[in-house]
């Protein structure tokens, strides 16, 4: 991989390694170490991507399969190593881009000055909510209404604690990704789909979501969830911000908020607010057509303050569609599908927006009603001890219909 | 039974036949207590309501070959309109008019497609409803049958066999011709030929020489357009490209025709049902373009 890097980033990497070694010798070099590490993460330059396309024979062969002319590489200025006092600027920039999770990776976080670390941590807590570890019940598609133990094929899955974005990724969020030249940053993408990246363009042929024009969105849709993106674009964005897509069980856990009594199957909700659909709490069929701002339905949030989980747009998950279904109920499709959850503004039946309903979609499809949000495992981050123990309480809403003693966090 | 009793019973039957009621669809005389027309199997309730309320419901003729998605489309259309949509509101007249909606919705809610309409005319759904339109004071009474696709094909190929279809085609005020977009896009011209036959049949039926089909609104609706982007974006261009024969016939014989694209689900896949049969299953229900053809037909029926 190092062969692909332009000399400037190599220099940053070398500096990071050198300073990391020095750090153990002299703790006063903490700030300099942070600068070097940040440089490496922040300056994933498009120039590096161009280099990949030129030298990698596999990528070159695959790219030649597509007749389309590749978009011109964006010229980027040489990367300058910032001074130690520029760390706040870099942190600001990364927080503004929604890349806070990168700052809190252990390899970076331990080098951040305390005030910058605290700022990053606060930004993370503002944008993500903790879903505690525990079990979740997944019902394979087609067995939602099955009765009797013989027919039920629920799978109970144990999950570690993770953080989930409070809102779906918006057009404004995604703009940062597009502007940073991430469509040409090949390391963000699965090598197998490199040829397809050239087809991930907007109406005007620029890299970006399907319905954008000239690499940007319509101004009034800034806070609407980004749609018209494939599963691969969602995965690439998640990598760029230092996160990942939630798995199917993780998404269900965030909505259904399972409560497990000892030895019993988890009791789950159908919707974030309870078991009955309330059309005032989600953007589903028969409301004004189209997506709405991600903050339009704040009363429809989950127990821990995650919004827009139901309705507005379907959300890509990382998992294959119906992977847990019994063999006799497996789907036959032209291509393996990825699981999507939550329903959209044009979902006709309430039941299809419920937590126990999954649909599937071709990972290359760029639908008008599929967006995504990101997640990250708690174990992948370095948070302050106080924050780790209190963040669940901090992000829990007071409107839970469950008695307080039923909450998993009540035991903590 | 005594001879006197038998005479009384026969007199009663004769009296009943004297008080016969004509089927609203095929005009055959029926016993006033008959539930379905003895000739075309249309519900006599339509004739009863028309006579009692002194109304003349207009007939909308849905035509398609088999497996084009007619039942799914009509069932969902009735459901959407019953919730009021795009200034149109649908009120069923009589319990039998709700059956199509009820059955279709019960399947779609489970994310399954409803089974094809049976070949037996007694089992066909007939919807009689009032359509309330925004800006129009007077509601429109409408009859909408869901006729089996194979029966349509038989009637089109061997005219004069099916009284029900002939009746609705003769008296129809507007027509919905449904065409499977995927079959049309696949090439081979079979869908083109099949649709030409439907239109040719329709153009030859008219009870009133002053109101031929060339003057009535005909909506040609491409179904299952969810998996055919080209069709969804421009159904007219799609028709010109993939159904050239239909396009030509519409130009020559139908003066009031428009092309639409519709879809009920967002993609479908196959799986085995509980009996081991391979069935097509919708991935999720996201209706698109369902009401537009109907709204256009309603505006043309004024």
Image (cartoon, rainbow, N blue to C red):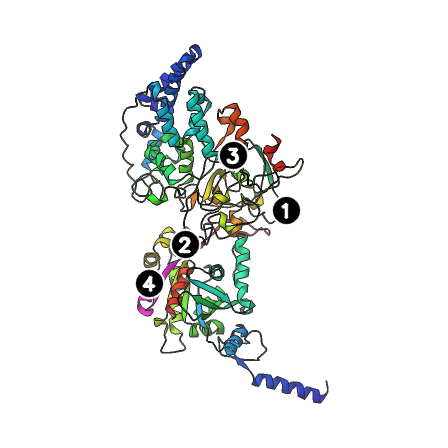
* Relative image position of residue A78 (x, y in whole percent): 28, 24
> Is the same chain shared between marks 4 and 2?
yes
Report how far apart the C-alphas of labels 4 and 2 lie in the structure. Answer: 18 Å
Rate crowding at label 2 as few (under 14), some (14 to 19) or many (20 or more) other CA atoms within 10 Å.
many
Please tell me whether mark 3 sits on a helix, a strand or a loop.
helix
Query: Which mark, residue B225?
Result: 2
Query: Outermost residue, front direction?
Result: A398
- The answer to whether residue A365 is above or below residue B104 is above
Report how far apart the C-alphas of labels 1 and 3 lie in the structure. Answer: 38 Å
- Badge 4 or badge 2: first in the primary sequence: 2
- Badge 1 or badge 3: first in the primary sequence: 1
* Residue drawn 37% across the image and 35% down it: A194
> Is the same chain shared between marks 4 and 1?
no
Q: Nearer the viewer, mark 4 or mark 2?
A: 2
Magenta highlight range: B247-270
In which quadrant will I find the C terminus of chain A?
Answer: top right
Query: Which mark, residue A395?
Result: 3
Q: Which residue is mark 4?
A: B247
* Relative image position of residue A93 (x, y in whole percent): 36, 29
Report how far apart the C-alphas of labels 4 and 1 lie in the structure. Answer: 51 Å
Report how far apart the C-alphas of labels 2 and 3 lie in the structure. Answer: 44 Å
Per the image, is B253 magenta? yes
Q: Are marks 4 and 3 in contact (CB under 8 Å)?
A: no
Q: Which residue is mark 1?
A: A151
Q: Nearer the viewer, mark 1 or mark 3?
A: 3
Please tell me whether mark 2 sits on a helix, a strand or a loop.
helix
Chain hosting mark 1: A
Report how far apart the C-alphas of labels 4 and 3 lie in the structure. Answer: 61 Å
Q: Is residue B221 visible?
A: yes
Q: Is residue B27 left or right of residue B216?
A: right
Q: Is residue A325 left or right of residue A1?
A: right
* Residue drawn 67% across the image and 36% down it: A263
């Amino acid at each position: 991989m190092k062969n692909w890097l332009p000399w400037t980033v190599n220099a940053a990497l070398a500096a990071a390694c050198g300073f990391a070694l020095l750090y153990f010798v002299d703790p006063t070099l903490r700030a300099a170490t942070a600068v070097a590490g940040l440089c490496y993460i922040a300056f994933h330059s498009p120039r590096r991507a161009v280099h990949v396309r030129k030298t990698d024979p596999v990528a070159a062969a695959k790219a030649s399969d597509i007749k389309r002319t590749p978009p011109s590489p964006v010229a980027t200025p040489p990367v300058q190593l910032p001074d130690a006092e520029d760390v706040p600027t870099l942190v600001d920039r990364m927080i503004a881009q929604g890349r806070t999770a990168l700052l809190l990776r252990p390899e970076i976080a331990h080098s951040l000055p305390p005030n910058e670390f605290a700022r990053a941590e606060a930004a993370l807590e503002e944008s993500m909510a903790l879903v505690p570890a525990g079990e979740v019940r997944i019902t394979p598609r087609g067995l939602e209404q099955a009765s009797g133990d013989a027919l039920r094929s629920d799978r109970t899955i144990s999950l570690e604690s993770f953080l989930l974005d409070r809102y779906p990724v918006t057009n404004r969020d995604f703009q940062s990704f597009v502007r940073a030249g991430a469509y040409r940053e090949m390391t963000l993408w699965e090598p197998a789909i490199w040829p397809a990246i050239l087809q991930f363009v907007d109406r005007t042929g620029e890299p970006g979501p399907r319905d954008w024009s000239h690499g940007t969105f319509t101004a009034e849709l800034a806070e609407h969830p980004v749609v018209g993106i494939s599963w691969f674009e969602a995965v690439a964005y998640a990598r760029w911000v230092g996160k990942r897509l939630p798995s199917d069980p993780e998404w269900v856990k965030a909505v259904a908020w399972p409560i497990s009594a000892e030895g019993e199957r988890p009791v789950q909700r159908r919707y974030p607010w309870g078991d009955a659909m309330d059309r005032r709490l989600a953007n589903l069929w028969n409301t004004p057509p189209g997506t709405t701002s991600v903050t339009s339905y704040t009363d429809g949030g989950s127990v821990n303050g995650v919004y827009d989980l139901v309705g507005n747009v379907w959300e890509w998950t990382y998992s294959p569609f119906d992977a847990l279904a019994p063999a006799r109920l497996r789907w036959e499709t032209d291509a393996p599908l990825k699981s999507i959850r939550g329903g959209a503004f044009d979902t006709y039946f309430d039941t299809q927006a419920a937590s126990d309903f999954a649909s599937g979609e071709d990972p290359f499809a760029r639908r008008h009603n599929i967006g995504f949000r990101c997640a990250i495992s708690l174990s992948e981050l370095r948070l302050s001890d106080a924050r780790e123990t209190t963040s669940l309480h901090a992000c829990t809403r007071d409107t839970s219909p469950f008695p307080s003693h039923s909450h998993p966090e009540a035991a903590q | 039974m005594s001879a006197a009793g038998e005479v009384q019973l026969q007199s009663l039957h004769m009296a009943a036949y004297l008080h016969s009621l004509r089927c609203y669809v095929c005009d055959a005389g029926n016993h006033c207590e008959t539930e379905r027309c003895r000739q075309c199997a249309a519900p006599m309730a339509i004739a009863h309501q028309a006579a009692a309320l002194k109304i003349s419901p207009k007939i909308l003729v849905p035509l398609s070959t088999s497996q084009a998605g007619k039942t799914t489309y009509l069932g969902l259309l009735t459901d959407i309109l019953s919730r009021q949509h795009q200034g149109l509101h649908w009120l069923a007249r009589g319990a039998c008019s709700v059956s199509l909606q009820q059955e279709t919705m019960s399947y779609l809610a489970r994310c399954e497609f409803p089974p094809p309409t049976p070949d037996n005319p007694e089992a066909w759904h007939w919807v009689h409803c009032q359509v309330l339109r925004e800006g129009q004071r007077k509601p429109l009474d409408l009859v909408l049958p869901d006729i089996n696709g194979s029966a349509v094909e038989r009637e089109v190929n061997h005219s004069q066999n099916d009284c029900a279809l002939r009746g609705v085609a003769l008296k129809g005020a507007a027509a919905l011709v449904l065409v499977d977009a995927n079959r049309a896009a696949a090439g081979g011209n079979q869908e083109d030929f099949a649709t030409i036959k439907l239109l040719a049949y329709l153009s030859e039926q008219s009870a009133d020489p002053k109101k031929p089909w060339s003057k009535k609104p005909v909506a040609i609706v491409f179904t299952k357009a969810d998996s055919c982007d080209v069709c969804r974006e421009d159904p007219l261009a799609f028709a010109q490209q993939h159904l050239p024969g239909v396009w030509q016939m519409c130009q020559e014989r139908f003066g009031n025709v428009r092309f639409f694209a519709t879809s009920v689900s967002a993609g479908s896949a196959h799986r085995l049902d509980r009996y081991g049969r391979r069935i097509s299953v919708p991935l999720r229900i996201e209706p698109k373009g369902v009401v537009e053809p109907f709204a256009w037909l309603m505006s043309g029926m004024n």
